[in-house]
Amino acid sequence: MKLPRKVVRAEIPTAPMADIAFLLIIFFMVTAVFSATKGLEFKLPKEHQEPGSEQEEATFIRVNPDSSILVDCKPMQASDILEYLEPRLVRNPEKPVILYTDPYAPYQAMIAVYDVLASAETERGFRVKNISVPTQTEVQEYIVLFGLNPFESPCADSRQPER
Amino acid sequence: MKLTPTQRVAALIPTASMADIAFLLIIFFMVTTGYEVDRTPVDLPESSQRTEAAKDAAVVVLARDPDTGALSYKFSDGVKRTSVVGGPEDIYLEASRLIYRDSTRQFVLKADGSVHFEKVDELLDRMRRGGVQNVLLLTQQRTVSGSAP
């Protein structure tokens, strides 16, 4: 007598695959942090580096505690800085730009000016190659050597209240 | 006349392609997800120019408590998660250690935009003393409504 044989078909159960996949999607969606590490490149000078330029040759930008800006002692909006710098830097691309920020000015104010200088190439087609941001330690070293703060004195007269 | 019974069509949602779509989405998330070493909420300054940080960049955080105004400092070597450090002097020691191994290592400075510049300046000065040269000042994208001072 021939017994009927039950044929078992070889199958991989794929039904729960979608469930597992969607669980994984939910996990990635919850834990995902899209990379937000972007910012402005900033080069720090080497320790004991010789100063590269005379101060009077440079364009001097001062950021005040109230976030107002003085460029070569003239009050200016951040949006007008490139217009002021363009003829000077086109004539001499190596001309240094000193960006001095008052210790009590908000960090955002310094970044706003630095951002304008960094955008010169895309906005106006010239580069501000030589940006110097003096630290307070460097300022103190100047004061010890010369007895005055070179970054305070150039604009001392322009910051006097009008009479 | 006897009509033949209408053929009944079972209502079915085709689920065969669901797994394929799900796996495509998984691959998308796996590729785009970045693992961040620091997730400290910081009110970053805004800028229009932004460049990507190096993958192994060390991270220095200067955060400000919105309620008390107290400042806190954190450091990460770019591999481990950020941990709280005492202040700029600890940053100097950590930076010196990293720069000793790799002099070109990039440092990302994640500082609150509302802090006084002297605090940022102090950090930059310590990093410079530690031999750091390549710094990325972390910013958020300036929006259309944002305006420069």
Image (cartoon, coloured by chain):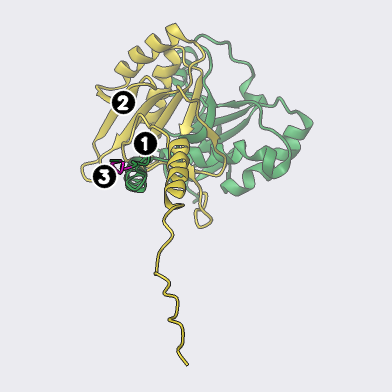
Q: CA distance from mark 1 to mark 3?
A: 14 Å
Q: Which residues are magenta?
A: A2-6
Colour applied to chain A: green
Q: Identify the disc placed on residue B116.
A: 1
Residue occupying image coordinates x 73% and y 28%: A93
Q: Identify the disc placed on residue B15.
A: none
Is there one chain holding both mark 2 and mark 1?
yes
User: Percent x, y for residue B87?
Assistant: 28, 22
User: Percent x, y for residue A95?
Assistant: 69, 27
The crowd level at tag 1 (other Cα within 10 Å; few <14, some 14-19, many 20+) is: some
Circle 1 or circle 3, nearest the eye: 3
Q: CA distance from mark 2 to mark 1?
A: 26 Å
Quick one: label 2 or label 3, which is nearer the N terminus?
3
Say which amino acid is labelled 2. Answer: Arg
Colour applied to chain B: yellow
| Residue that badge 3 annotates | B66
Q: Main secondary structure of the magenta part?
A: loop
User: Percent x, y for residue B148?
Assistant: 52, 49
Whether residue A76 can be seen here: no
Of B63 and B23, the residue lying toward us:
B23
Residue occupying image coordinates x 44% and y 11%: B99
Left or right: A110 as drawn, with respect to B40: right
A159 up-or-down from B71: above or below: below
Residue occupying image coordinates x 41% and y 63%: B13
Say what secondary structure mark 1 lies in.
loop
Q: Identify the disc placed on residue B81.
A: 2
Q: CA distance from mark 2 to mark 3?
A: 23 Å
> Magenta includes B123?
no
Quick one: label 2 or label 1, which is nearer the N terminus?
2
Of A149 and B72, the residue lying toward us:
B72
Q: Decide: marks 2, 3 in contact (CB < 8 A)?
A: no
Say which amino acid is labelled 3. Answer: Pro
